[in-house]
Amino acid sequence: MPNRLAHETSPYLLQHADNPVDWWPWSAAAFEEARRRGVPVLLSVGYSSCHWCHVMAHESFEDVATAELLNEHFVAVKVDREERPDVDAVYMEAVQAATGQGGWPMTVFLTPDAEPFYFGTYFPPEPRHGMPSFGQILDGVRNAWADRRDEVGEVAGRIVADLAGRSLTGALPADRRPPGPEELHGALMGLTREFDAVHGGFGGAPKFPPSMVLEFLLRHYARTGSAGALEMVQATGAAMARGGIYDQLGGGFARYAVDATWTVPHFEKMLYDNALLCRTYAHLWRATGSDLARRIAVETADFMVRELRTDQGGFASALDADSDDGTGKHVEGAYYVWTPEQLRAVLGDEDAEFAATCFGVTEEGTFEEGASVLQLPDTEGLVDVERVASVKRRLLAAREERPRPGRDDKVVASWNGLAIAALAETGAYFDRPDLIQAATDAADLLVRVHMDWHARLHRTSRDGTPGANSGVLEDYADVAEGFLTLASVTGEGVWVEFAGFFLDTVLLQFTAEDGALYDTAADAEALIRRPQDPTDNATPSGWTAAAGALLSYAALTGSGLHRDAAERALGIVTALAGRAPRFIGWGLAVAEAALDGPREVAVVGPQGDPATVALHRAALLGTAPGAVVALGAPGADEVPLLQDRPLVDGQPAAYVCRHFTCERPTTDPEELTERLQG
């Protein structure tokens, strides 16, 4: 018999709807039930494409004996971290503070007042590798609750008090200034020390795509001409593109590499990674003209549209790491890896030998049970490009016949904002109007389904129905960023207006008096702590994403209020630039834009006129950090930057402004390109 999760919309929660565990969704009713029964709460947090979440579900939550123990002595609450990042953030902070590490599935035991007192992540069904079994954990917590409840309450109270004392409000530098040239140079030096000069990227295993850091380095290179900054981007970009973390057949990136060489990925594919990396590679092409960067940007955009686009025009959250290996068993990476025998079955002996050499497929394998993750080393000029393309097409067609990984088809507002920005720019750079249309369709969905009459955002939707959960700071910030980018590409000023609505909400609901930002709105559900984190994780933090969107909006509209808010928010980047540059990459990128101006470009001319199109393209391809572009016909006033911008001698013209000063207009695309070099 299905449990209470059967009525939820989250694919992750629905995966647990048939568990024998009597799950509750996160709700006041769940905690009231715990108070009524006098039992603790088990909080289990995960997401649909999480491999170890699936493992623990199969081992423990599908086990009848474990479920009986849980149901008798606990109220079990299941949370999709992608739906409720606020709940996840608050309790993950507690887990990390208590254990020194975190991850998913996250397992936390709470009092009926939602105060945490015992923490963990994955627990096996039997004691293993020094870890207690999940059953032992349940027995231990049950006994502590029954025999030492006062002690449990004291522990929970101390933890909550510690979390409450971690607010960053009041922690900004006294002058609240954005980083200057010295701090940004210090960040570059810090990244140089952590750079892996052999394999690219930063740090060791596991290795995550550093998309936000790469964006900072590209902007720093544009402003300063630093060869070292560009070299780190080029080396990392090439290593990832040619490694196993990139899907050499279908395009798109896996979540991370389990090793330091980018060889073996954790195979889940997330919308946010691919959106961020698509944009980064497009910007790398813009800076260098790299054919490799162009190919990866376009293939990644095509992957998102082909594999993640929903029937309603939005983009699904993720593809699972696991899939059926053909025997009914779900195995990580089964959809993606190859053995020499499998190559021969598809390609024949001669082409299979060629493919094995080309893609690094060996008898020993690079993954499990003799299978290999496809890689594509730098063999330009050494192999037949057409033959490689033919082999890729045939292998991809054969792979399409394999059981596909599951797809989490909920639409997350913030991640769709990132996708809108990436697809709009990639479509504009590479003359792909279909990608621009896909970005527009996603933006339409966010307005139609995710936005209410008060311009407040729902974080998620599924099948065109909004979820009950409210948007958090990153939703407002990333959607505003996507809409502002879409406006620059299409010339449709309505997207600037919508972005303004969302950023006004950021100022009213998420911003403290000193300019610090909270992850949840002032009128959101109260948790044991109001989450607040300026550092980047897998995506730009809501804090730094808001700073970037506020800065761009101010440049397009002339709003001093939004500019001041952006600069105050960047104060935290000043504090962190030298200490933790890897974890504040987007903030550093925004700071580069603020230091450069950012430059404001108004392109005025009849829509579709070849001269207007040429000027607009030159504006979009300018490498000046964070430059904003407005496009409109003569007399257009939807975007304030366009106001009072006449044609020049009857010809389309571009106006470039910075620091409250405008240069003379130009009608020459080449001259505009020169003006917009970093």
Image (tube, grey):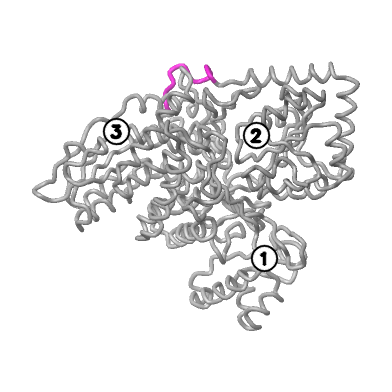
For residue 625, which quarter of the picture? Answer: top left
What amino acid type should be assigned to the residue bearing mark 2? Asp
| CA–CA distance in space, label 3 to label 2 | 36 Å
Residue 50 vs 86, above or below: the answer is: below
Q: Position of residue 463 (x, y in %)?
A: 54, 50
What amino acid type should be assigned to the residue bearing mark 1? Pro
For residue 628, which quarter of the picture? Answer: top left
Extreme residue toward the left, this view:
649
Q: Which mark is residue 557?
A: 3
Q: Earlier in the sequence, mark 2 or mark 1?
A: 2
Identity of the residue drawn at 18% across and 49% down: 605
Residue carrying label 1: 403
Secondary structure under tag 1 reads loop
Q: Position of residue 623 (x, y in %)?
A: 35, 47
Residue carrying label 2: 88
Secondary structure under tag 2 reads helix
